[in-house]
Amino acid sequence: MAARKPLLRIPYTDVFAAPRVVPRNATTPAGAVAALAAFMTAPLPPGLPPSTVVLTGAGLSVASGLADYRGDNGTYRINKTYRPIYFHEFMASHEARKRYWARSFMGWTTMHKALPNTSHYALRDLGRLGHVQSVITQNVDSFHHAAHPDVPSTIELHGYLRATVCMTCGNETDRDTFQSDLARLNPAWAAFLAEATAAGAFEIKIDPTTGAPVPRSPKTLTAIRGIRSNPDGDVDLAHAPYTTFRYPPCQHCLTHPPTTEDGTKHMVEVDQDGAWQLPRNFSATDSGTKVKCPGILKPAVVMFGESISPAVKHAAEEAVDGAGRLLVLATSLATYSAWRLAKRAKDRGMPIAIVNMGGVRGEEVFFAEIADQQPGNEGVRVELPTNTVLPPLVEELRRLGPDGDHERSSNLDAGPVEPALFRDMLS
Ligand SMILES: [Zn+2]
């Protein structure tokens, strides 16, 4: 029987049960910070490496102005018409790619302008203090990459939007360069984007007190023909003529046509302006799109229905195995790829702390044997925003200093995970 590859699926849409806060006094910010500080500094069960691996999700980027997949009650986003593209659709259909890139072209402005927030910088500081060596994220916004490019190292489980990747040769192109190419090939769309931007459709306002994004005025949105941002960084455009949208091919495959084993060269076909075109002899029923339709660029993210590359999967498992405790931040672990990492940590006997608004998939199992009274050494479950607890946690760990930190020297000796390991993840 052939083994089936695990594919990225649309996450659970159930509402998970409300969490049991552990320890009991971790309901207040002060109680939560004390519990997390105990968690981060307590001696570990024998045999576990003395460091913490962090697993993050969409909730961490909400304060940067990016939409979360979940609504207030942990339900799927209110935008019921939002349906992400599947990998097989993207690869099989020129029309689907036009639609995807048109929406992505409009959405990139929001994504590009958004910046890491307090939580990302708190993780940088936890790395500098020697507490955290690696962060595994499900987010594709590159905020970890921007806030802490070196330490802690970042494993981007679901890829990243900052680059496109050629499905034939594996070359990556910077997304900003790609955006300029899209603007050149689609002047009418570029003008519309400029108009929408000037009207403030993509403004992100952050409330200085809460650090949370201020919702855009519905008036502005209606004025811009009902633009809505989705978590993948694209937007909905009612009745947009997607079919007129053009996108460029991989420049490497254009100048170096890929050759099949029988010596046949497969040329990338382009229109007079250099936009990708379906090869004239290509039939929609042809298999082997990769060879016969060369030079297709895809965002360097793992799409729904696509499998995570073995290298990334392996790197994430190594990060869990190289740590003694797991800190889960701002995710309900609804995607299987993230949940199985938490399960792996649990199976290894690692203490687990979760900071998330709303319930988390399978969390009752993670905390089943953890008493309400323990100070946080064995496990912590907090239902507060990460921006509320992480900065004071950094301060507390700084205050405790090396004496309160049993593992600082060994962590620094171990050094950061070799960044080269992650370079080729998506090629
Ligand atoms: Zn290529």
Image (spheres, rainbow, N blue to C red):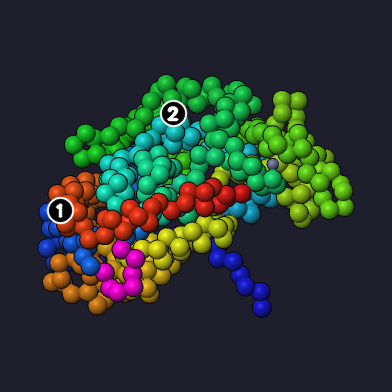
Res 171 seen here: yes
Q: Which label's residue is closer to the chain start, 2 or 1?
A: 2
Where 400 falls versus 373 (above or below)? above
Amino acid identity at mark 1:
Leu
Q: Does residue 100 appear to the left or right of 413 in the view shown?
A: right
Amino acid identity at mark 2:
Ile
Q: Nearer the viewer, residue 222 or 421?
A: 421
Q: Residue at x 69, y 50 (%)?
A: 92
Residue 266: x, y in percent?
A: 81, 43
Q: Nearer the viewer, residue 204 or 395?
A: 395
Where 387 falls versus 349 (above or below)? above
Q: Does residue 306 appear to the left or right of 233 in the view shown?
A: right
Tell me the element at label 2. Answer: loop
Q: Label 1: how many residues lie within 10 Å, few (<14), some (14-19) or many (20+)?
A: few
Is 49 magenta? The answer is yes
- Mark 1 — residue? 400
Q: Quadrant of residue 20?
A: bottom left
Residue 27: x, y in percent?
A: 15, 59
Q: Which residue is drawn at 76% across and 54% down?
A: 288
- Mark 2 — residue? 224
Q: Quadrant of residue 276?
A: top right
Residue span colored magenta: 44-50
- Asked if the residues shown at circle 2 and circle 1 are in contact, with their CB atoms under 8 angstroms apart, the answer is no
Q: Residue at x 76, y 25 (%)?
A: 272
